[in-house]
Amino acid sequence: MPSAAAAFHRRIDDALADTRVRAALASTMTRLTNGRAGALASLEASDAIRDQARRIRAHTIAHLDTYLDQFARNADARGCRIHWAPTATDATRIIVEIARAEDISLAVKSKSMVTEEIELNAALGAAGIRVVETDLGEFVVQVGDDRPSHIIAPIVHRRREDVARLFQEKLGARPEEVADVAAITAFARRLLRRDFLQAGMGISGVNLAVADSGSFCLVTNEGNGRLSTTLPRVHVAVMGLERIVPNAADLGIVLQLLARSATGQALSVYTNIISGPRRPANPGAPGAHGAPGAPGAGEPDGPDQLHVVIVDNGRTRMLDGPLAEMLYCIRCGACLNICPVYRHIGGHAYGGVYPGPMGAVVSPGLMGLDQWSELPHASSLCGACKDVCPVRIDLPHLLLTLRAQAADRELGPWWLRLAMPIYAAVATRPALYQWLGSLAARVSQGLARGGWIRHLPGPLAAWTAARDFPAPARRSFLQTYEQRRGRTGNAS
Amino acid sequence: MPPAPATATATATAGSDARPTSPRRVQLFVTCLVDRFYPGVGDAVVSVLERLGVEVIVPSDQTCCGQPAFNGGFTGEAAAMARHTIDVLTARPDPVVVPSGSCADMIVNHYPGLFRGDDPYAARARDLAARTYEFSQFLVDVLGVTPAPCPGGPRLAYHASCHGLRGLGLHDQPRRVLQAVAGDRACALPDAEVCCGFGGLFAVKMPGISGAMLDAKLDAIATSGAEAVVATDVSCLMHIGGGLHRRGSAVRVLHIAEAVAGARRA
């Protein structure tokens, strides 16, 4: 078994052994899925809106080059500086260069999965630039030298007591400062406020860029996104190149679904539309030196520089292949929340930045199957993810596509690669199929006690690890059908 | 009225309720698991349909629909098995009834995609897909019948098998059938629409996760108060039943056709 697969199975076993985390995970996921169901139910014509959102995403992805060019042109006209990053390394190099050019020693960061993907914190740290995560969950992740386990709720694997202990050990918090969630939040806020005021650079993600205006939208629930993008003099927005819609009306459609699908909120607490850096005073205009807000006075706040780093990192490869539909994803996390597999193993077991059903497609999609061929198999293909996806991505189909690619490349267990062609050869020869079936039945009858088998041999032992296996019938339905008809007397 | 013994109860209402245009003859695709592990389920399907005045033909060359290969990513092997099944089931024009939402979903939703547009099997796959039905779907949507109550049988809980539910949209059909059979002996199963963890080879490839999902399902069954769990698929029932037996539970598993036919497999 390749080591990546073995490591995956080890992570699964570790996750399953942690019953405390599993219980917490199950209750949070239930709360989120119920919230989603309620929020969607309260949205009039939610099915039609989902159809429309899917059309918007499909159209955008089909014309991605056009809309990206349009966005870049318009954002540039608003004073943004656009950077194209073909790879994660390019992206981090670009951001480090910006920081160095501006003599940045401290950056504050709003929650962003794409910056996790490109491992930005490590790159900035290596360049001697301190980065502070300002989303409370991400802050806890950073303090604990941990990794997010959910794309929306990064510390869903941590309980309040864990965070309290962590803050006491690592940050010197006194017991009363971490007595409850409110105290923990206030403690973190006090520390973060200092960093917000000192940081020269703010880093954010981009939920959705708007092509025809050159603006982009950032949704958060904590206000840290707004502070990160307005206080420091340099703002770097990092954007996966698929995160774009044609216009503001389309943005409105998608936003109706994003928070509802993610957390059950009608809208996130903060929905920011960012349109370029701070506009300076226009010296020629009347009132240029008047009070803030006066015509021509320039904007009172916002960064002097706004850099947008558009990251490819495998996305155009997905665009050109059978996984393109995955690029419709708006990163709401609904598929994680509903997924029974995610609920039992949590996010860390998946190994990548993106867990759950979407992660099982995105990780091999972006980084190739070599290290990620087992991920698409970590699904019973129950289809619950497809049911809740706001843009109706056919995740089971994409998982099957990846399984087929893995099988074509002879990745996966040897016994399956051996067994499947034999099985197909037998199943297309009915007489042989029945004969071998009866043979197998006779053999397994020998293993059975009272009609049940408690220990199956070989790879099938995995079945009897958790459940008994029924002994097959000595003679099959088809072998005995004519006799059965005679006996039951039901022939018409 | 004294409760009749469950095994003796005639069940589905007479053919007079059937729609005038409803087919008088069907082909049974019994599925590999029913064929080899649960032949009684095949008997139950035949018995219910024949009592409704529908002639049942069982093509003798049928084998497996190929879903294990398809779900494993072995599309070439899956296509070979699909070709075989298409040959077997398109020799006649009759509708096909399948006592499995999952195998029916394979034929209805996945067969057509296995063949390129210019492959003659593509059109034959679409033809077969258009006349293939899961058992309860056929009763409710095609025949338009509701089974008669089966008094005195066990308390039943319904587990919604994933592929029937989400692939074929079988939400109401099996529930209506069971409600009719069980009446006030129907028990609510918490999280009835959450996967039991079977997933075909998933149960063997990811045994830990599959086992955890099964445990959650078994816990839900224990709280439901049911004496038997009913589903449209013997695959889920093999999984759940194996778990129940390992736990030493007295709860039985019943295929929906058996529940309709009078819970004859005790």
Image (tube, grey):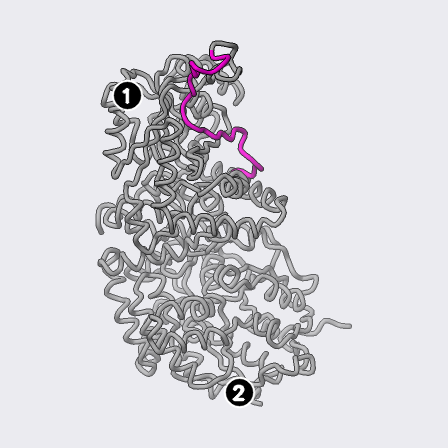
Which chain is home to disc 1? A
Find numbered disc 1 in the image and state the secondary structure of the residue it sits on: helix
Does the segment drawn in magenta span residue A215?
A: no
Is residue A292 shown above or below A250?
Answer: above
**x and y, in percent, of residue A289 in the image:** 47, 9
Find the distance from the CA under tag 2 to the CA under tag 1: 84 Å
Front tag of 2 and 1: 1
**x and y, in percent, of residue A225 in the image:** 45, 25
Task: Identify the residue position indicated by label 2 in the image.
Answer: A487
Residue at 30%, 72% in the rendered image:
A424
Q: Quadrant of residue A239?
A: top left
Is residue A395 shown above or below B185?
Answer: above
Q: Amino acid at mark 1?
A: Ala
Is residue A186 shown above or below B208?
Answer: above
* Residue range of the region highlighted in magenta in the rendering: A263-288
Q: Is residue A4 left or right of residue A323?
A: left
Which chain is home to disc 2? A
**x and y, in percent, of residue A417 in the image:** 25, 63
Q: Is residue A103 left or right of residue A169?
A: left
Find numbered disc 2 in the image and state the secondary structure of the residue it sits on: helix
Q: Is residue A88 visible?
A: yes
Does the segment drawn in magenta span residue A283?
A: yes
**Which secondary structure dominates the residues rendered in magenta?**
loop
Q: Is residue A261 visible?
A: no
